[in-house]
Image: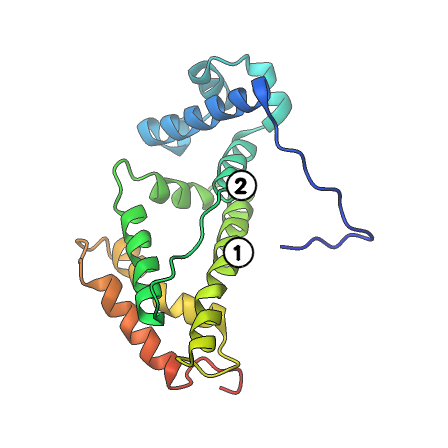
């Protein structure tokens, strides 16, 4: 994601040593407090006590709960994750859906808790938007590979296809709270792949 700046910004330096340890401790404390007590009891003081970090350190660096949640989500997007290459569009989309289903049904339900918390904090909501933006950008390679293999027409809208392929996972598991269906990731992938091959997601349409 680019920024509107008059000149390129210098690369941000990753914190190391004691700073990195403190950040990791605080992130762990945020998640643990959120999972055990919910958003309403997620406070800077509670996180500081749980992390074993002085409260002034937490206030100085993260300011408030929104800043804490945003940093946890931003850190999640700084990993080295990338979409699998299974050799086919349907296989790649199914692999993505398998990962989505695993995250949404994991115990404890950290992903669901962070999504829910984003509705209570503007900062967290913006951080979640950044996270998904990075993920969708990385996943565009799935569509690019399919175009190169001749599975999809040139001009296929990668974001629209990826949203269509993964949407059934969120609808069933988050909105309807349905029992996880092991066949759903593949079924949703197959439907989206067939529609995309027919030109449903080309720019002309």
User: Which quadrant of the figure has residue 187?
Assistant: bottom left
Percent from the top left, x then y, of residue 75? 51, 38
Compare marks 2 and 1 and give the one earlier in the sequence. 2
| Residue at the spot 62% in from the left edge and 25% down from the top edge | 61
Which quarter of the figure is the N terminus placed in?
A: bottom right
Q: Is residue 190 left or right of residue 205?
A: left
| Residue at the spot 46% in from the left edge and 44% down from the top edge | 118
Q: Residues within 10 Å of mark 1 (few under 14, many from 20)?
A: some
**Could you say whether the residue bearing mark 2 is in a helix, strand or loop?**
helix
Mark 2 to mark 1: distance in Å? 11 Å
Residue at image mark 1: 133
| Residue at the spot 41% in from the left edge and 83% down from the top edge | 200
Residue at image mark 2: 74
Q: Is residue 198 visible?
A: yes
Q: Is residue 63 visible?
A: no
Q: Is residue 103 above or below residue 26?
A: below
Percent from the top left, x then y, of residue 2? 67, 55
């Amino acid at each position: 994601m680019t920024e509107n700046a008059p000149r390129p910004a210098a690369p941000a330096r990753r914190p190391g040593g004691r700073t990195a340890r403190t950040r990791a401790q605080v992130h762990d404390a945020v998640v643990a407090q959120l999972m055990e007590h919910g958003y309403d009891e997620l406070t800077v003081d509670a996180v500081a006590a749980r992390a074993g970090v002085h409260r002034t350190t937490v206030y100085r660096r993260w300011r408030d709960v929104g800043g804490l949640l945003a940093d946890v989500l931003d850190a999640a997007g700084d990993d080295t994750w990338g979409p699998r290459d299974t050799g086919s569009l349907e296989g790649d989309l199914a692999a993505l859906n398998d990962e989505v289903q695993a995250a949404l049904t994991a115990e404890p339900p950290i992903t669901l808790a962070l999504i829910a918390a984003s509705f209570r904090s503007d900062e967290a909501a913006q951080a979640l938007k950044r996270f998904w933006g990075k993920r969708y950008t990385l996943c565009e390679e799935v569509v690019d590979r399919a175009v190169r293999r001749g599975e999809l027409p040139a001009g296929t809208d990668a974001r629209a296809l990826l949203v269509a392929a993964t949407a059934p996972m969120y609808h069933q598991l988050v909105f309807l709270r349905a029992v996880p269906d092991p066949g759903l990731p593949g079924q949703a992938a197959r439907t989206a792949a067939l529609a995309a091959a027919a030109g449903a997601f080309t720019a002309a349409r």
